[in-house]
Amino acid sequence: MRFYRLGLVSAAALCVAGPSMAQFYGGDFDGRNGIVINNDAYVYDDFDVDGAGWMVTGIYANCLTMDEISSMNWEIRSGISEGNGGTLVAGGSGPITQTLTGRSGFGYDEYELRISGLDLHLAAGTYYVGVNVGGPPRQTFVSTTSGANGFGSPLGNGNSWFDSDFWNEHFRSIEELLGKGPWDFSYGLVPEPATLAALGVALTALATRRRGS
């Protein structure tokens, strides 16, 4: 019996916990499912970078797990299609923080797994983010989302992929694995502080103009 997914069963009641500041956040866990990211398994979901590009300092994934996880692998890719991993733009591994989100499902608590200290510039374009936690004794599942409380683009488009030699699945569409979707995942990308400051100034200026109109 394959165990790369949690299965379509009812989840526990969810409480809303908004993401910390990010350039992209796919949205909160929707209680529908989760996909394993242990061993060599990666789950990828797409996001768009606009304007002059982004400086990314952190990546996080909201995951259902019973384990204490100390490190995480991450990748950014472009051009993924069925059976094709596209181009590896950047990747690495490092220590993480593990923080309860207040949500749960399928008998698991959900945690934000965050890797920080990155220094990654992404030019404008479409990319895919994926993470992997290696081989803790029990499995860890990245949470599905329908886009609630998400921001950035795209949200809820179902352009997500699974890759694992262990599970003998090479860049398979999540919809092929789980059935009709769309299926998206609860990932976030964190900007450098200067980017946040610039965003804050822009939003303040916009609010001032609106008050004066």
Image: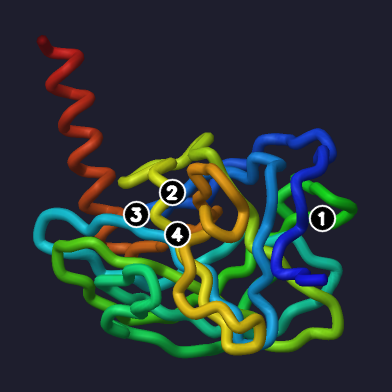
- At a point 14% along the width and 63% down the height, the residue shown is 124
**Answer yes or no: do the residues labelled 2 and 4 have beta carbons within 8 Å?**
yes
Number of the front mark, 4 or 1: 4
Q: Label 2: which residue? A: 158
- Amino acid type, label 1: Asp
Q: Label 4: which residue? A: 160
Give whichever of 65, 117 is nearer the camera: 65
Q: Label 1: which residue? A: 109
Sooner in the amino-acid sequence: mark 4 or mark 1:
1
Q: CA distance from mark 1 to mark 2?
A: 24 Å
Looking at the image, is 194 positioned above or below residue 38?
above
**Answer yes or no: do the residues labelled 4 and 1 have beta carbons within 8 Å?**
no
Q: Label 3: which residue? A: 23
- Amino acid type, label 3: Gln
What secondary structure is found at the residue carrying circle 3? loop
Q: Quadrant of the C terminus?
A: top left
